[in-house]
Image (spheres, rainbow, N blue to C red):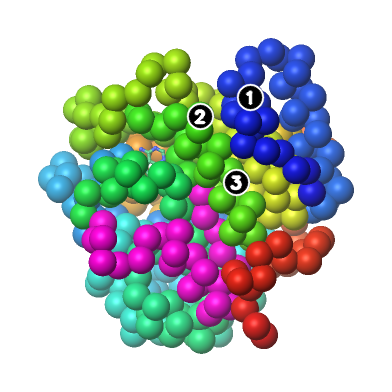
Amino acid sequence: MHSLNRQEIIDWLKNENSRELDDLFFAADATRRKHVGDEVHLRGLVEISSYCRSACTYCGLHAGNKKAIRYRMNSEQILKCAIQAERLGYGSVVLQSGEDPQFDMKSMEQLIRSIKRETTCAITLSLGERSPEEWARWRDAGADRYLLRFETSDPFLFQAIHPDALSNIPSRVDQLPVLRQLGYQVGSGVMIGFPGQTFETLADDLLLFQALDLDMIGVGPFLIHPETAFGTGWVPREIDPTNQVESSVDMACKVIALARLLRPDAHIPSTTALATLGGVDGRIRGLKSGANVIMPNLTPTDLRGDYAIYPGKNVSFETAQVCRMELFDMLKSIGRVPGKGPGHRKRSQAPTNPSFTPKT
Ligand code: 5AD
């Protein structure tokens, strides 16, 4: 594992020398190959509900957005998508939604059980902050992984961009070990370049990825949505503009590369946000900077446009079959191969944070 200290990370984040950055991307790519190989794991993403009870200042699906179109898939629709994921050869299905209480403990449990009965897919949940009881029940029902981005390690910023986060419940950073103890493979991450984010906070985020010993790390550029607080020009704090992290493909690739060096055996996606900002090239650059996962969209095409967490998301309405062909061609063109099987994290080193590891 590379040991990068806080100042070195900050220096890399600020570095704009393309020759030096090529060295960073090269080192990250070599680390990726050594620890997780040339396989790119494909996780079929199903956006099961656009309802949300939360008030996040960055997300187009926040509860107060009256213009957002809300939909909720039913169990049969979701099961169909999971079966399609398996047919397409994707080893995992990711069920993602806003924080939608209608998907309660029981209905999710039944859904997870039916997907496990009908397919061999691993199941990743990305349903926001839920109760430990719900997480435990869903894990018992067969869910394998949970994604919960902490978005920023700075407590002030976290509170500012999550105005309804309650101070009497544990922060997301403190909830991640709960998920780990329940036996989930745990993923987290941050957005890159939202107003108020400094190089120092982003460096701290990266160090936290390492300290938490995350199994999955998802990062992508922040994309401003007009119907949000950020969209109205609100800022959580005034900072020196030279210290503001920019939202760009370059910056996202730097963060992916640093995450790879800090957590060599983690699963790191080249995210949809990166592809939204940088097109196919953006996605490829992510894969060449340390990423080893892609999450192809399996949400039914007539619903996709309504899962608008940021503008331009899901602009491709091609069928899952067409997306898959394009994806396989793209992987071939860069010398990578589609992953087989569930694609669980394989540790290449002992846990770095024993207190964050279940005692099983
Ligand atoms: N721009 C980029 N990423 C966003 N997300 C939410 N809103 C935005 C946005 N405007 C990310 C958050 C969330 C994940 C599902 O999508 O990090 O955790």
Q: Quadrant of residue 239?
A: top left
Which span of residues is magenta-colored? Answer: 165-189
The residue positioned farthest toward the right in the image shown: 34
Picture coordinates of residue 136 (x, y %)? 45, 82
The numbered dot on residue 199 is 2
Q: Nearer the viewer, residue 123 or 224?
A: 224
Q: Is residue 210 left or right of residue 229?
A: right
Q: Is residue 15 left or right of residue 132?
A: right
Looking at the rendered structure, the secondary structure element under dot 3 is: helix
Tell which quarter ligand 1 is in. Answer: top left
Residue annotated with mark 1:
11
Label 3 lies in ligand 1 vicinity (Cβ under 8 Å) = no
What amino acid is at disc 3?
Leu
Q: Quadrant of residue 17?
A: top right
* Vertical order, 21 against 92 (above or below): above
Picture coordinates of residue 13 (x, y %)? 60, 26
What amino acid is at disc 1?
Asp
Query: Is 187 in the magenta?
Result: yes
Picture coordinates of residue 257 (x, y %)? 68, 36
Residue annotated with mark 3:
207
The residue positioned 26% from the left and 66% from the top of the image is 168
Q: Is residue 315 left or right of residue 215?
A: left
The first of marks 1 and 2 along the sequence is: 1
Query: Is 31 in the magenta?
Result: no
